[in-house]
Image (cartoon, coloured by chain):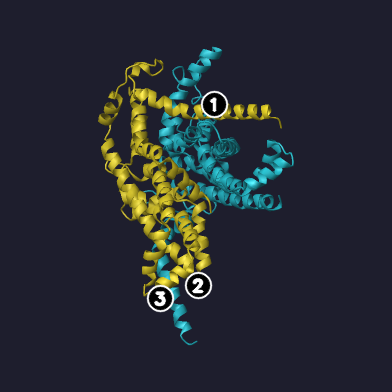
Amino acid sequence: MTGAADTLDRVLNTLAAWALALLWVLPLAYAIWTAFHLAAYEARFELFAPLTLENFSKAWEAAPFARYFLNTFVLVTMILAGQFFLCTLAAYAFARFTFPGRNVLFALVLLQLLVMPDILMVENYQTMRLLHLVDTIPAIALPYIASGFGIFLLRQTFMTIPKELDEAARIEGSSFLGVLWKVYIPLAKPTYLAYGLVSVSHHWNNFLWPLIVTNSVDTRPVTVGLSIFSAIDSGIEWSVINAATLMTSGPLLIAFLLFQRQFVQSFMRAGIK
Amino acid sequence: MPMRAPNIKREWIYGWLLLLPAMVFLFAFTHIPAITTFLNSFFSTPRGRRPAKFLGLGNYERMLDDPVFWKVLWNNLWFALGTIPVSVGLAIVMALWVNEKLAGRSFVRMAYFTPTVLPLIAVANIWMFFYTPGFGLFDQITGFLFGWPASNYLGNPDTALNAIIVVTVWKEAGFFMIFYLAALQAIPVSLKEAAQIEGAGRWTIFWRITFPLLMPTTLFVCVNAVINSFRLVDHIFILTDGGPDNASALLLFYIYEVAFRFWETAYGATLTVALLILLSLLAIGQFFFFDRKVHYK
């Protein structure tokens, strides 16, 4: 291959990569443009059009977004805490204990990777009704707390931890839970971070199950709130809807831009098995 | 060693106790509902004081006679065929680009990945504006460049599903790219260098070395993509609400409609069973199909 052809190849690749990247940011860039400009500039592009925050304040006043944010925050925290607790214990059992039924139970855990709670919404709704939990935040959280994905991910991590460390801690007199707390959990920190980021972004963005199981302002997460807000066709301007859209995805988006490397690595780590 | 027997028993009990909480939740919200879904699909929907009646295969007969069921199944197939190859293909290309020394690489990578962190509902809102007839960006561009008249992409049965597919590809490709990027970084550089010394071009290197080594990732990504093609319905609520005339409804969306808009939970359960069977068949099929390719190449 000659040098000139190689350079041409590189230039073409760079151009194509950039063209696709620009195409990919266009929708978001456009939403940002309309959200920060008056409605008059929705379809008119003038570089020096006056910037405004009016759309955000209009959206904030038009729907109880503060409450929606609080609900999402409570929901995401509840799910994450529950997942960390249950998945840690289960993963520890699968990684370091032998007992009858282990393989069958592990297969049942893996089954959840295919049959997700969202798919079983009809029955799960009946369960929540029996438990008198419909329209509560725990009802949104409960089906996701025992996560097959989380158990699998943590088990894989725990299995890479040398048994000698485990045994050394036991000789020093730690109980089996003490070993988990002192040896396994500290060494699995990167996995917890990765799983935490994936879980938070997934449940922050989740929509279908919360839509079904909530029906009041006090329980709705931001995604459901946003869908109700933008479904009112009557007279809400696009710029206001876009402002609300950015607002709801804002916290995650900002966190992503700040911790880009960690996010990307977390998603990678969570995907490689 | 007489001490051993009680020791083993204690280990069993620890193991079971550690598993207990997770298993209670797993059974309560996954396994038992899966079984009751199956059982309920043989009964009628209980209404008020009227309890559920055993119908045998009645719900299944109804499903097979239901034109909407076949319509959404067909839509789902089309949706899967439209989203999976394109988003997986784009993901590979994106990963290859981002993995190279490219000017402005971090911006490019960010651009590809950002849609992944947005809620699908927000994505739908953003794209809604693109598709608005006359006013939206698509119409403005096609009108400006080719002088096309305003067209209602989401309101036309011929284009509604395709419009949804475009949005889904935009959202998913960057997510899959991450996995390919991880896999590419794990491929030893020496392999590529050896091939270059032998005089292999980029194209040959990709098809003979990189692509086969990416096969396990492709399997993983495809399993994810297939599950997603049955699971991602959030944006439909905003963009088309399944319409016009179910042209853009997918199976899970139809289950939602039947169970939570018409409150026919028994028929909803029957449709859920169909979805579960479909997912299992696909998982099994995919496993065997890819298993061969992964090993023999």
Q: Which chain is tinted yellow?
A: A
Chain assignment, label 3: A
Mark 1 closeness class: few <14, some 14–19, many ≥20 residues within 10 Å: few
Chain assignment, label 2: A
Checking the image for residue A19, the label placed there is 1
N-terminal of the pair, mark 2 or mark 3, is: 2
| Residue situated in front as seen by the camera: B247 or B290 | B290
Figure quadrant of the N terminus of chain A: top right
Secondary structure of the residue carrying tag 3 is: helix
- The span from disc 1 to disc 2 (Cα, nearest Å) is 57 Å
Foreground mark, 3 or 1, reads 3
Mark 3 closeness class: few <14, some 14–19, many ≥20 residues within 10 Å: few
Q: Are marks 1 and 2 in contact (CB under 8 Å)?
A: no
Q: Which residue is mark 3?
A: A171
Taking A243 as reference, is B278 above or below it? below
Foreground mark, 1 or 2, reads 1
Checking the image for residue A100, the label placed there is 2
**Residue at the location (51% across, 57% down)?**
A110
Residue A119 percent location from the top left of the image: 47, 48
> Mark 3 is on which residue type?
Ile
Chain assignment, label 1: A
Secondary structure of the residue carrying tag 2 is: loop
Residue A53 percent location from the top left of the image: 29, 25
Q: Which chain is tinted cyan?
A: B
Secondary structure of the residue carrying tag 1 is: helix
Q: Residue lying at the far front in this picture: please name it.
A: A3
